[in-house]
Image (cartoon, rainbow, N blue to C red):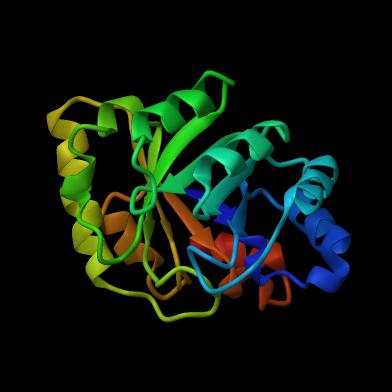
Amino acid sequence: MLIAPSILSADFGRLNEEIDELNKTDCDYIHIDVMDGHFVPNLTFGKCIVEAVAKRSKKPLDIHLMVKNIDFFIKMMIEVKPYSISFHIEEEKHINKMIHQIKDNDIKAGIALNPHTSQNSLEYILRYIDFVLLMSVNPGFGGQNFISSTLEKAIRLKEMIKDNNLNCKISMDGGVNSQNINLLKESDVDIAISGNYIFKSKNYQEAINLLR
């Protein structure tokens, strides 16, 4: 299972140092939640901050857009050249257009689902995307409790992927820690995104080791 620390839980006052600490670990990606204060009731990172993280980071960036004007933000974040970008199916009407806009720039494209959104909404999209991001908390703020019903969604989604012989990964974000990571593994999740658990620990590598 791949591990992606979410810097939503980092100390923003010492963000350079936080990125340096992650660079020393064997984490696979750095997960960045971009929120606009409209799609979710929180405002986080703009392009300047994401560019600063990209310059400092030795890890690939995984950008999660929790925004309303998806086209605007995709065009903005493409310029940063991250490893991957995901956006929410609940907000976008022209999903294929957005997916191709990302992939045409050699960036992995993903679709994010809120806890209440069914995996069946992806039936005609799975073949075009590289991963699905399942939210296991209500998006907007870190430190929330894990919503266990997301595990059932992951199992059903993996069945859809296997039945159609697709190469699409599943990532899960929200309340992930060493107490529930085995449940993610049993549900065939490929990428575990963890913020509060890693950044509240005294040693980031030890926290990642426990997740692995």
Say whether residue 54 is left or right of residue 84.
right
Q: Residue 20 is drawn in which quadrant?
A: bottom right
Determine the residue positioned at 40% across, 65% down: 181
Residue 191: image x %, image y %? 44, 49
Residue depicted at x 56% and y 27%: 107
Residue 142 spot, x, y in % from top left: 55, 74
Seen from the viewer's position, the closer of residues 68 and 202 is: 68
* Residue 82 found in image quarter: top right
Q: Where does the image place residue 24, in percent across and percent down from the top left?
A: 78, 52
- Residue 177's place in the image compared with 47, above or below, is below
Is 51 in front, or is 14?
Answer: 51
Question: Foreground residue, 181 or 137?
Answer: 137
Indicate left or right for 3 with 114 as reference: right
- Residue 185: quarter of image: bottom left
Residue 67 at x, y percent in the picture:
52, 55
Outermost left residue: 163
Q: Residue at 47% across / 80% down in the picture? A: 144
Numbered disc total = 0
Does residue 183 appear to the left or right of 192 in the view shown?
Answer: left
> 7 or 197, which is in the foreground?
7
Q: Is residue 115 left or right of residue 82?
A: left
